[in-house]
Amino acid sequence: MTTLKASQARIPTEVFNRVVYKGEAIRVEHRSAGALFLISEDEYKAFRDWEDMMDLKAFRKAKKEFLESGEKAIPWSQAKKELGLE
């Protein structure tokens, strides 16, 4: 992740303070490139934790389905060859 100073990103102090101290999320639009959102570090961490939880849930579901299927696991060395990773 790249880190910039607020002054480098030209974020006005008032906007920075609304996000950091009041917990407000702010959408920043660009006329042709879409948008980005300014959120607090706590909100970002909460999102990352949620994302990790969803990944773990998906892993557990896939693992359960695999174990119930009775299929035999493929060794990692074989999978790497088949995927062209060697």
Image (cartoon, helix red, strand yellow):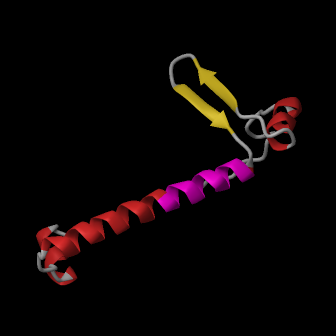
Location of the C terminus by quadrant is bottom left
Is residue 76 left or right of 32 when viewed as pictured? left
Q: Is residue 30 at all visible to an observer of this figure?
A: yes
Residue 51: horizontal and vertical position, in percent?
51, 55
Q: As displayed, is residue 77 above or below residue 83?
A: below
Viewer-proximal residue among 74 and 9: 74
Q: Main secondary structure of the magenta part?
A: helix
Residue at x-position 51% and y-position 61%? 52
Does 49 appear above or below 12?
below
Residue 45 position by quadrant: bottom right
Q: Which residues are magenta?
A: 42-53
Asked where in the image residue 85 lies, by quadrant, the reply is bottom left
Residue 85 visible in the displayed image? no
| Outermost top residue | 31
Residue sitting nearer the eye, 51 or 18: 51
Q: To which quarter of the image does residue 14 belong?
A: top right
Above or below, 34 relative to 80: above
